[in-house]
Amino acid sequence: MPQLLRWQSTTQAFIEPLGSGQALTMVRIPAGRFEMGSPDHERGRDDDEGPVHMVELQEFLMASTPITEAQWIAVMDWQPGPGETWHVPLREESGKSRNKKATPDAYESDTSLHPMVDISWVEAMEFCQRLSQFTHRHYTLPSEAQWEYACRAGSSSAYSFGDTLTAELVNPVLLKAGNAVEEEYRSQSVQLYPANSWGLYDMHGSAWEICLDHWHENYEGAPSDGTSWIDTGAPDTADRVLRGGSFESSLADCRSASRRRLSIPARNRWDVGLRVVCLPGTPAPELARPSLAPPDRDRSARQPQVLWIDDHPDNNRGERAALEAEGVTVLLASSPEEAIELLAASASVDLLLSDLRQGDDPVAGLRLFPLLQARGIVIPVMFYVGVLNDERTRKALEAGALAVINRRDQLLEAVQTQLASRAAEKPA
């Protein structure tokens, strides 16, 4: 079971690095019981949402957002290890780049943080298989019961936020009478709106999410233990289930209990994506771990990880790319506080890099040290600054920084030296 971190006041999570600066935040969903389905009086209810029945679930972990385009591409780019092959290829382009239903200027130029959509059943299962193979943990699609339980997050209303949605909670396109005109249908970046009380984002109206269960017309005979409802002997082409609604959906389709049929043989809708779960206590297949490093590197060596704090993701792109070219995984945090949470989630980060300045505060990076001490985290810290200042450098070194650097070549040399030293200190 991965090390967990405290997330706000009620939720725990861990970080699964994917390479290319990407990571999955997996949120702990506590064990519990809930009434699955919708009551007869719920507005927008369909008959396939009943009968309401009690389900008891064990603890599991669920991705905090739908899988984004950037996360999909990071996994797509993994190379299989010696003697391995992937089952099916994963395509880089999403539905937004293939489907011309919306006008070209309706989208942001960078959609890397949008949900990866137009996903087939086979591709969704391949994505989960690669995650399991790479991490030696059991990643899969959620069961219908797991999805609804996590979406509700203890609520019994139509949505996890209550019986109505507002523009502060979901894509405003969903709120327009009769839905928006065709040109306005579009996805949005994840995490633009609040998470539910268990730390899950975009459960309503972002992208339809595929569940493991075979499609059933109602819940007569459904499992009561939260497992997926699979028909033994059903063909590979048997229909599955979609949950959550999308940017093309009506508000009724975005309710916690709403469900739709996924026809497997077809490419399906361009607004279908996925969200993964990790099942603790269930071993992943014992397969070799593929490498994120270039082919001429030792595949058996653990790839070093650096956590870089910067309040703007466009800063220092060249430096991060140079580190990744040397086989270093670079994770990003936007503040010292976010970095501390990420560090608490992973014992595999080797070095912390930060600018001293954030916004108008020229020594904001010094907040790292009391935060690290409060958490009992011991990790080397370096600062990479635009302009050296004797007084700020002195304060940083007195606080415990390894170095304050303002040249790229010196930074790369210092990072590699420190990573080599860390590797030598660790037991084989």
Image: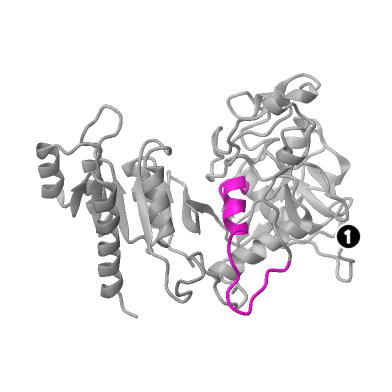
State the residue at coordinates (62%, 49%): 67
Magenta stretch prevailing secondary structure:
loop
Residue type, numbered disc 1: Ala
- For label 1, the residue is 238
> Horizontal placement of 393 versus 59: left or right?
left
Quadrant in the picture for residue 157 = top right
Mark 1 secondary-structure assignment: loop
Query: Residue 79 or 394: which is nearer the viewer?
Result: 79
State the residue at coordinates (88%, 60%): 238
Quadrant in the picture for residue 101 = top right
State the residue at coordinates (65%, 62%): 128
- Which x, y percent locates residue 350? 32, 61
Question: In the picture shown, does residue 285 fall above or below 101?
Answer: below
Confirm whether the magenta stretch covers residue 310.
no
Confirm whether the magenta stretch covers residue 83.
yes
Residue 179 in view here: no
> Horizontal placement of 253 versus 12: left or right?
right
| Magenta segment | 63-87
Residue farthest to the top, as pictured: 177
Quadrant in the picture for residue 122 = bottom right
